[in-house]
Structure formats: structure tokens, C-alpha cells
Image: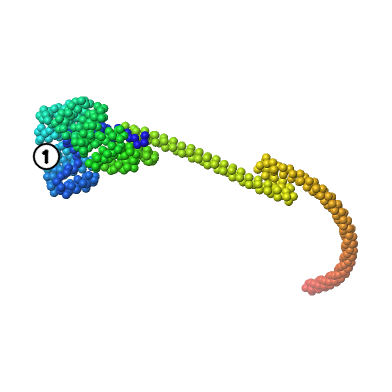
Amino acid sequence: MRGSIDMKKILFCLSLIWIVLFIIGCPAPKVETPSEKQLKPVESPPEEDFAKGVQLYNQGNYTEAAKAFSDVVRKDPKNYKAYLNLAAIQMKLDNVNEALNYCDKAAQADPNNIEPVLAKALIYKDTGRYNDGIKYLREMLKKFPNNSKILNNIAVLHRLNKEYQKAEAVIRELLSRDPDNVEAYKNLSLIYYDLGNYKLAKLALGNAGKLDPKDASIRNNLGMIALKMGDYVSAMGYFRIALELDPNNIEAHQNLGTIALHFKDYNAAYSHFKVIASLEPQNDNAIFQLALSLIGLQKPQDAMSKLEETLKINPKKYEVLYYQAFINHTYLKKIDEAIDLYKKFASSNSKDKELKQKAVTMIAKLEEQKKQAEIQKKMLEEQEKKMKEEEARKKAEEEKKRQEEERFKDLMTKAENSINESKFVEAKGFLNEALKIRPDDKDAKAKLKDVEEKIKIEEAKKKAEEEAKVKAEEEAKKKAEEEAKAKVEEKVEKKAEEEAKVKAEEEAKKKAEEEAKAKAEEEAKKKAEEEAKVKAEEEAKKKAEESAKDKAGETKDKAEEKKEVK
């Protein structure tokens, strides 16, 4: 359900000081302890540095607050309260050993003051070192014999260590010496409360109430017992009486606020946790529960702001991550951010296994939802696409129909105009196109039939005209062919005559050329013969001359030979 909260997660464990009550079975409404205080700056005389330190502490500025208190002890080394405040700061910074050292310094500053002893015991309690705390307090009994505050705190530590018989023995020893010790009865009641013996717890508180009727914490714890016994009406009555006795009783406001959350009275819950936050601005539990109340009031942005404020005060308040995730997926619809925050919480060092399991379950659920949402989104997108396509198709069809209607009218108009102009074939084309759009249109059919008859008449007339034309063309063609033939024959004859004439001329020319050639050859032959004859005569003459010459030479040679012989 929107705005609903897991009530098991809004009931918180307590940190207690001097005489301390610590409810192990958290979640549960808050039970007030005897002489309960918190380890926080104690108001002191108005020294400037001390007041400044308190202010800085309340603002969560622990580093600067430590400097201020260090200035106090530097100026006033006996100011044990400043040392205790330094111890409180170191606890906020998780420096346990430093905190213990400052408690020792506070004890040295004021050796006879019990407060530093109880503060150190508280640190042992808050860090779960119950045996160390018991050992330390028993050692302090040597310095403060039979001190009721120390004995009450020893009993508390035994109870937290589940050593109920030892715790009861310490209280009974204390009551045997001091039967009117209200804190002892309150502690005895808490022992029975833890053991589940609520009647004895109520009886022990009854004794305390008789001794101190105006103690608001007694009424608060009676309310807790009534809750355990299932009597919500009486419980709320006790818590309201506690507030009447002490309007600023934080535990009563816590318990009434828790019950209001349980019954989904978110306005009442918001009012109670707002008082606590105003009294203790650094109370991360109160601010956290304010955030849960705001979730119930369906004010997610305001709730988210308070959750962020809680983390600033206590970064280890891992449960904040769960409710930040819750707001993101329930109200802001930021599924991815919610899954991341659930995963951070599931992997954190939170000891709340049940809430971690819920975170794991939510992770699986949201991832499945995310997967289904993506599938759904895809389906919706596909459906939307189909719807758009269908819409576009219908629109296109309507547009087509409109255009066809307009075209039909236009075609019919054109057909009518063509008929009026006796353009029947053209009209037939327009009418056929129109009938493709509206096949059953009677007017178009009738006009088409009329047009087709007129076309037949025109075609018959045209055919006759064409046949006559063809016949005339054939006759004209035949005549033209005959004329062309005669003309061709005439041309052929003329050409033959011209060719014969040319041939005769060529033959005559050829004959003349041959005769001229023969005559030229004959003359050339005759000339050659004459030249040959002359040449032969010349050669014979020359030869005779050479022969005569040779013969004369031989005669001469012979004469010379003869002469030589002689």
C-alpha cells in the first residue's frame, strides 16, 4: 500500500549513560533507564569556549567542537566536564581508545567525582565490552565503596551480558543496604522485563513509583511492560502520564511515536518525533523516524530530506538506504535509482537480516517489473505503431476515395464535353476510366453504351471512307507505277543508245590508237634496223682497222726479232 511502512523497522535500540538500560531485542519501543542521560556535552558555567564547543557539537561539527573543548582544558585543566565532552566527541568519531583516555583525564581532573567513572563504564557498555566494564566498576568500588550508582551500573552490565542471576544478586545486595533506592527497583524491574516475567517487573516498578511518584521514567517503563502484556490502552496511558510529569521525556515521546506509527497515526507520530529532534538535533533515530512519519503522510520529498539529514549525522545508518529506495520506487517512480539503493543496502553492513532479505526480494521484484514494463512498453509501442499504421491506412483510403470521387466527377465532365464535341473515342476513354472507379455507375454505363454505338457508326463511315481512299490510292499507285515503268523503259532505251554510241566511239578510238601504235612500232623497228646496220658497219670498219693495226704490229715485231737475231 502506498505510504505504508514496515513497522518492525521503526523501533530502535537505545544508547544509555550513567545507569544504563539497553533493550537487546530491537525493534521495540524505548524503555527509560534509571538516571538516564546521554554521553554528550554537559552545560557548564558560561565560559565562552565551553559554550562554543556545546554549540558546535549540537551542529555536528565535531572537529571544531574538539578544538573548543581543548582550549577549555588548556585554560582550565581541572574542568572535568570538558574532558567528558571530548570523550563524547571521540565516540562520535569512533575513536574508542581516545574516548577512554579522556574519561581517565576527567577522573584525574576531579578524582572524587563519580561522573568520569560512569562515563567510562558507558563506553564499555556501548562497545559491548561488558566484562571490561564490570571489571573496571568493581575496581572503582574500592575507591567509592558501596556506591549505589556504581552498583546499579554493574547490575546493568551483568544484565546486558545475560548474567541475570548476578545482576539480581547485585541489586538485592544494594537494596539490603538501601531499601529506598529507586534506581535499584527500576533496574530490578528491567531484569525481570528481560526474563519475560512482566508481573514481577511491574511489581518492582510499583515499589519504585511509591518511593518517587513524580519519576516520569517509571511511568514510561510501566507503559513498556503493558505493551509486552498486550495492553496498548494502558501502555499509552502510562506514556502520557510520563509526559505530564516531564513534557520533554524523550523515551515517552519515542514510545508514543512508535505506537502511533504502528497504528498508522502518522500525524501523531510526526509530532512526537519532532519534539525529540528539537531536544536532540543530532539524534539520528528521531530524525529517521520523522522521515518514516513523513512517508506515511505521503510527503516523499520531505521524507527524503530527513533521510539525507539522518545520513549526514550517522553515515552508518544503513536502513536509510532501504527507505530511500522505497520512496524512489513507490512515489518518484525512479525504478533504476530504487534498485541501486536496494542493492547498496543489501550489500551494506546492516545487521537487519530481515530488512536485507526484503531488499533482495524488492530488487528481484523491481527488476522483474522493469523487465515486464519494458515488454509492456514494447507491446504498447507496437500497438501504437499498428494503430497509427491503421489510422494512416484508413486516412489514405479515405483520401484515395475522395480523390477517386473527384476524378470520377472530372472524368464524367470530360466525357460529357467530349460527347458534345463529338469526340466519342475520347469520351469512351474517359467513361472507361470512370467505370474503373465506380464499376456499377448506371449513368456512366448508359453513356458508354451510347458512345460505343456512335463510335461504331463513325467507324463504319470511316471504314468506307478508308476503303475508298485505299482504292483511290491503289489506282493512283498503279497509274504511277505504269508511268514510272514507261519512264524507266524510256530511260533504259536511251541509255542503251548512249552506251552503244559510246562503245562505237570507244572502239573507233581504240582502233585508231592501235593503228597509230602499229605504225609507230613499225617506224621504230625500221629506225632500229637502220641504226643497227649503221652500227654494224661502224663496228666492222673499226674491227678491220684494229685487225690491220694488229697485223702491222706483228710484222714490226717479227722484223725486230729478226734484227735481234742478226
Q: Position of residue 13 (x, y in %)?
A: 24, 34
Residue at image location 65% in from the left, 46% down from the top:
409
Q: Tell me how the rendering is colored.
A: rainbow
Which element type, helix, strand or loop, lies under badge 1? loop
Residue at image location 82% in from the left, 48% down from the top:
464
Type of the residue with mark 1 = Asn
Q: Is residue 351 rendered to the left or right of residue 73? A: right
Mark 1, Cα crowd under 10 Å, few <14 / some 14-19 / many 20+, is some
Q: Position of residue 475 (x, y in %)?
A: 86, 52
From where the camera sits, is residue 367 visible? yes
Above or below — where is 249 with respect to 562? above
Quadrant location of residue 164?
Answer: top left
Q: Which residue is mark 1?
A: 113
Check the picture and name the quadrant holding the C terminus: bottom right
Of the pair 206 and 113, the residue shown nearer to us: 206
Check the picture and name the quadrant holding the N terminus: top left
Above or below — where is 564 with respect to 109? below
Q: Position of residue 526 (x, y in %)?
A: 88, 68
Q: Is residue 414 rendered to the left or right of residue 224? A: right
Of the pair 99 and 461, the residue shown nearer to us: 461
Residue at image location 71% in from the left, 49% down from the top:
418
From where the camera sits, is residue 522 visible? no
State how many labels appear: 1
Above or below — where is 106 with respect to 184? below
Quadrant location of residue 105?
Answer: top left
Q: Position of residue 256 (x, y in %)?
A: 25, 34
Quadrant location of residue 442?
Answer: top right
